[in-house]
Structures are given as structure tokens and as C-alpha cells.
Image: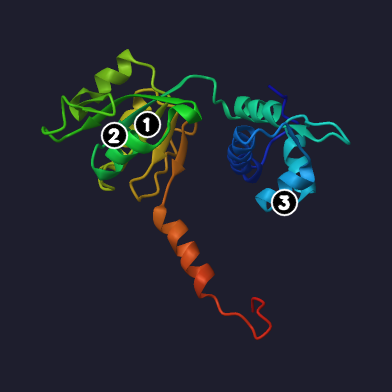
């Protein structure tokens, strides 16, 4: 893994998964190397931006040669921690939780979902995508007996803060929160929270397709 050159901004960190995804697609297409110009054009970024981002982690590639696609993908994967064997549990096996377990490729992103928890007697004791579903009453004991890195929260928003607290008390390092409420844990600064709001993305799209344009076709 490359050494970081000082503190890395959150903007750079959020671009790393895009690099990883695009490089994975290039590798599947049989690409061996790519220049920063070509990579930037494909991703809607400048070559300078890509070089600056990668320099945050020591720099990659060779002048006049570009980047080795597979090597750069693997290096970025290491930076993102894909090969560290992260474990996760899902809280809430309703429509969203069920869909995530069944359809989201956790394994491709370095996570192994080992259990799910719910309050519904109809799903407790069953499996979803080969993942066992336990009663939420068993959560605290489970966290004592198993190492869990991330809790995926898909419960109703009114109970999400309580579930987050239980996960944090059980030693979970990160929360992936879909409960449509902003979770803040001031007393647990060591825990990373990624709040996902589907409406934010949709409303951004709404703005983009609704904003007026001037007669020249340019944004006002």
C-alpha cells in the first residue's frame, strides 16, 4: 500500500471508489494501461486532478507510459481496505434490508455480511441470501461474541438512534445508515457514520433537469 502524503481530503476519498470501479471495468475489457488524460476524459475529470488525487497516496504511473490498469486498481483497492476482511451485520430485514442482502455485492467491495436482525417473528429464524436472521434481542450478545466492523441500518428512523447506540456499544467501527435520519454520535468520535439519503440524490437530479437556461443554451 502506498503511503499517504499528509492528510487526504474527503473529496479525494470520495473519488477513490469511482477510480476503483472504472479501473475494474477497464480490466474486464482487457485494457492493460491508460493515460491520465484518457482516464480523466472517461470519468469527467481533468488529468491534473487525477494526478493530484493519486499523489496524495505517493503517486502512480510512469511519464510517457501512463498507468498499469490492474496494478493501479489493486493499489486503490488496498487504499480502500477492500482486502482487510471487513465484517458487517444488517439491522432491519424489511424491503430495503432484504434487497441489500440479496442484491448488493458486499463481497466485491470487501465486506462479508454475517448476520441480520429484525423484530418480525415471520423472518426471525429464516435466512435471506444465506444470511441468518436473528431476533434484535440477540444483538448485544452477538456483538460480544463476534467481531463486527460495520452495522448496516435499515430500520425505521425513530429507532435508528437507539440501534446505532447499541452497535457502537458493541464495538462496531462504522455505520452505513439508510434510516433517512442524520445520525450523529458526538460521544463516539471513533465511529464513522455514512448517512445515505436517497432523496438527496433524487432532488439533485430534480434541480438539474429543472433549472432555467438562457437563450444561448447556457446556465443562467
- N-terminal of the two: label 2 or label 1? 2
Q: Which residue does the numbered mark 2 point to in the structure image? A: 91
What secondary structure is marked by label 3? helix
Q: Is residue 101 above or below residue 52?
A: above
- Give me the residue at 62% from left, 43% from top: 15
Residue 151's label in the rendered image is 1
- N-terminal of the two: label 2 or label 3? 3
Residue lying furthest top: 145
The image shows residue 195 at horizontal and vertical percentages of 43, 45
Q: Nearer the viewer, mark 1 or mark 3?
A: 3
The image shows residue 56 at horizontal and vertical percentages of 74, 35
- Give me the residue at 64% from left, 83% from top: 214
Q: CB under 8 Å between callouts 2 and 1?
A: yes
Quarter of the image where one finds residue 5: top right
Left or right: where 119 falls relative to 106: left
The C terminus - image quarter: bottom right
Relative to the observer, which residue lies in front, 95 or 56? 95
Residue lying furthest bottom: 215
Q: Nearer the viewer, mark 2 or mark 3?
A: 3
Neighbour class for label 3 at 10 Å: few (<14), some, many (≥20)?
few
Neighbour class for label 2 at 10 Å: few (<14), some, many (≥20)?
many
How are the residues colored?
Answer: rainbow
Q: Which residue does the numbered mark 3 point to in the structure image? A: 41
How many angstroms separate mark 1 from mark 3 (CA)? 36 Å
Q: CB under 8 Å between callouts 2 and 3?
A: no
How many angstroms separate mark 2 from mark 3 (CA)? 40 Å
Relative to the observer, which residue lies in front, 218 or 53? 218
- Give me the residue at 28% from left, 25% from top: 131
Amino acid at each position: 500500500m502506498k503511503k499517504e502524503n499528509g492528510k487526504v481530503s474527503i473529496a479525494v476519498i470520495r473519488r477513490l471508489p469511482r477510480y476503483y470501479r472504472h479501473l475494474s471495468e477497464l480490466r474486464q475489457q482487457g485494457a492493460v494501461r491508460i493515460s491520465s488524460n484518457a482516464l480523466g476524459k472517461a470519468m469527467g475529470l481533468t488529468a491534473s486532478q487525477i494526478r493530484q488525487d493519486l499523489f496524495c497516496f505517493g503517486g502512480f504511473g510512469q511519464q510517457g507510459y501512463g498507468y498499469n490498469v490492474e496494478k493501479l486498481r489493486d493499489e486503490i483497492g488496498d487504499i480502500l481496505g477492500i482486502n482487510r476482511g471487513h465484517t458487517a451485520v444488517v439491522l432491519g430485514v424489511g424491503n430495503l434490508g432484504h434487497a441489500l442482502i440479496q442484491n448488493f455485492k458486499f463481497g466485491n467491495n470487501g465486506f462479508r455480511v454475517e448476520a441480520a436482525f429484525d423484530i418480525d417473528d415471520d423472518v426471525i429464524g429464516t435466512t435471506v441470501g444465506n444470511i441468518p436472521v436473528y431476533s434484535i434481542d440477540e444483538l448485544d450478545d452477538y456483538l460480544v461474541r463476534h467481531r463486527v466492523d460495520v452495522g448496516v441500518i435499515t430500520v425505521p428512523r425513530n429507532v435508528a438512534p437507539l440501534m446505532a447506540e447499541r452497535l457502537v456499544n458493541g464495538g462496531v467501527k462504522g455505520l452505513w445508515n439508510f434510516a433517512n435520519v442524520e445520525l450523529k454520535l458526538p460521544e463516539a468520535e471513533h465511529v464513522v457514520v455514512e448517512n445515505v439519503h436517497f432523496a438527496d440524490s433524487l432532488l439533485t437530479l430534480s434541480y438539474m433537469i429543472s433549472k432555467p437556461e438562457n437563450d444561448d443554451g447556457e446556465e443562467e
